[in-house]
Amino acid sequence: MSARDPIELWDDEAATFDEAADHGLRDPAVRAVWRELLLSVMPSTPARVADLGCGTGTLTLLLAAEGYVVDGVDFSPEMIRRARAKDPVGQVTFIEADVDDPPLEPGAYDVVLCRHVLWAMPDPAVTLRRWIDLLGPDGRLVLVEGNWSTGAGLPAAETVELVQATGREAALRMLPEAAYWGREIDDERYLVVSPG
Ligand SMILES: C[S@@+](CC[C@H](N)C(=O)[O-])C[C@H]1O[C@@H](n2cnc3c(N)ncnc32)[C@H](O)[C@@H]1O
């Protein structure tokens, strides 16, 4: 039996995706801690951000609301449709494409942001180098990843090593606090920032 197409799998997730506290950020308290976390690692505006694997556009639109110019990329038509529906004035450019090799302008971004997608790339080391190529001078990489109790994900040490193998620095911050997830967690969730 052949494996299901990943785009179809993510399309099927889209309708309920925002129900998870950290996905939809519907609870103002959860939204506030993510906002604070992201802004603490972002450059000041104006700055151009690529949100790779943007899903329903939650973080994309959060940053756009703070004055960043953001392009959100995702290969799931249903995720992109829902992201666009949250953005009636077209603050963000949402692009339907594979982020393994994003069709974005090299060197054009101040930040490449990716939450919970690097782990799913066929060869994260290769993908990461393509993402870094999108950054201009002093551009930074902001990765939120996890090594989840479901068995999916990337251990924090592995993500740090992947970034360091590109010759860049990587600062790791673990995110065990329930405030980010809307519940207690017992698996590994973290932020890795690679400054320019
Ligand atoms: C766990 S969700 C994270 C969504 C968003 N980054 C967030 O944190 O709310 C993973 C997203 O990555 C997208 N995705 C997975 N593999 C992808 C690929 N190769 N190219 C583009 N998008 C991809 C899925 O469609 C899904 O929307």
Image (cartoon, rainbow, N blue to C red):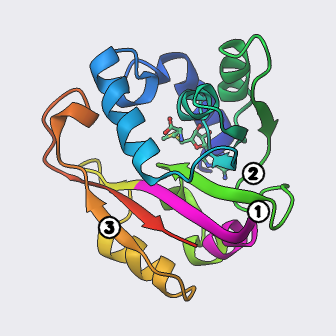
Kindly identify which residue carries mark 1.
101
**Mark 1, other Cα within 10 Å: few <14 / some 14–19 / many ≥20:** some
Name the secondary structure under disc 1. Answer: loop
Can residue 135 be found in the magenta stretch?
Answer: yes
The residue closer to the viewer here, 65 or 99, is 65
Q: Do callouts 1 and 2 mark residues in contact (Cβ within 8 Å)?
A: yes
What kind of residue is marked 1?
Answer: Asp
Which segment is the magenta one? 128-144
Residue 161 pos. (x, y %): 41, 82
Q: Looking at the image, is mark 3 or mark 2 nearer the viewer?
A: 3
For the residues marked 3 and 2, what is the alpha-carbon distance in whole angstroms? Answer: 26 Å
Q: Residue at x 65, y 14 (%)?
A: 86
What kind of residue is marked 3?
Answer: Leu
- Indicate which disc residue 172 carries: 3
The verdict on label 3 being within 8 Å of ligand 1 is: no
Q: Does label 3 or label 2 sit earlier along the sequence? A: 2
Name the secondary structure under disc 2. Answer: loop
Q: Is 72 above or below relative to 121?
A: above
**Mark 2, other Cα within 10 Å: few <14 / some 14–19 / many ≥20:** some
Kindly identify which residue carries mark 2.
98
What kind of residue is marked 2?
Answer: Asp
For the residues marked 1 and 2, what is the alpha-carbon distance in whole angstroms? Answer: 6 Å
Residue 157 falls left or right of residue 86: left
Residue 87 pos. (x, y %): 70, 16
